[in-house]
Amino acid sequence: MKRLVNLFLILLVLFSSLVGCSGVSNKAPGDSQEYSATFSIDCKTILDNMDMLATNKADIVPPNGMIMDSRTVVFYEGDSVFDILKRETSANKIHLEFALTPVHQSAYIEGIGNIYEFDCGNLSGWSYLVNGASVGYSSNEYIPQDGDVIAWRYSCDLGKDIINDKE
């Protein structure tokens, strides 16, 4: 019986450590410094490329191309752009689908608002800009600064159509 109890305790400790390493944040808002950023999600480029859009997606695209209008959001010390995206889409009941790739330690955004990569051509997909510029890091690796402007944008041309475009 004592061996069974010891085995149970060992398994409990292992499980606890795995949960702690799984990327699940246990921090409460009061545990760290609070910051703010301007945040938006848009697919405006699709409006100029409706001829390339998958036919079953036409009714999903918002008339103004904005999935989430620009707004101030709160984030906490250590949060990544990906953490903010997950929190805001969840809080606003916006569909989000992503793939985590542990080998590359990256989060790949497959779809937001039921609009997915390749829905508007072979070069289309989701990207994010910080203060109007492409960052070059996976969204789970980039830690924003207080006051940053974070824009998730759908591109129909590998990002060429969103980088110099006005927000």
Image: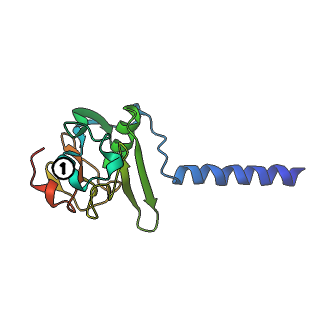
Residue 126 drawn at (x, y percent): 29, 54
Eyeballing the image, is 59 above or below 133?
Answer: above
Q: Residues within 10 Å of mark 1 (few under 14, many from 20)?
A: some
Which residue appears farthest toward the bottom when viewing the image?
A: 103
Compared with 103, 57 (above or below) is above
Q: Which x, y percent locates residue 66?
A: 23, 38
Task: Out of 32 and 105, give the one closest to the viewer.
Answer: 105
Q: Which residue occupies 31% across, 38% down?
A: 75
The residue beneath circle 1 is: 45
Q: Nearer the viewer, residue 152 or 26?
A: 152
Q: Give the position of the C terminus as an image quadrant.
A: top left
Residue 107: horizontal and vertical position, in percent?
A: 39, 57
Residue appearing at x 41%, y 36% in the figure: 90
| Image side of residue 165 versus residue 104, left or right | left
- Give left or right: position of 103 versus 127: right
Report the residue at 18% width, 50% height from top: 45
All told, the count of numbered labels is 1
Residue 100: quadrant of the picture: bottom left
Secondary structure of residue under mark 1: helix
Q: Amino acid at mark 1?
A: Thr
Q: Is residue 125 left or right of residue 167?
A: right
Quarter of the image for residue 87 reads top left
Classify residue 105 as left or right of residue 144: right
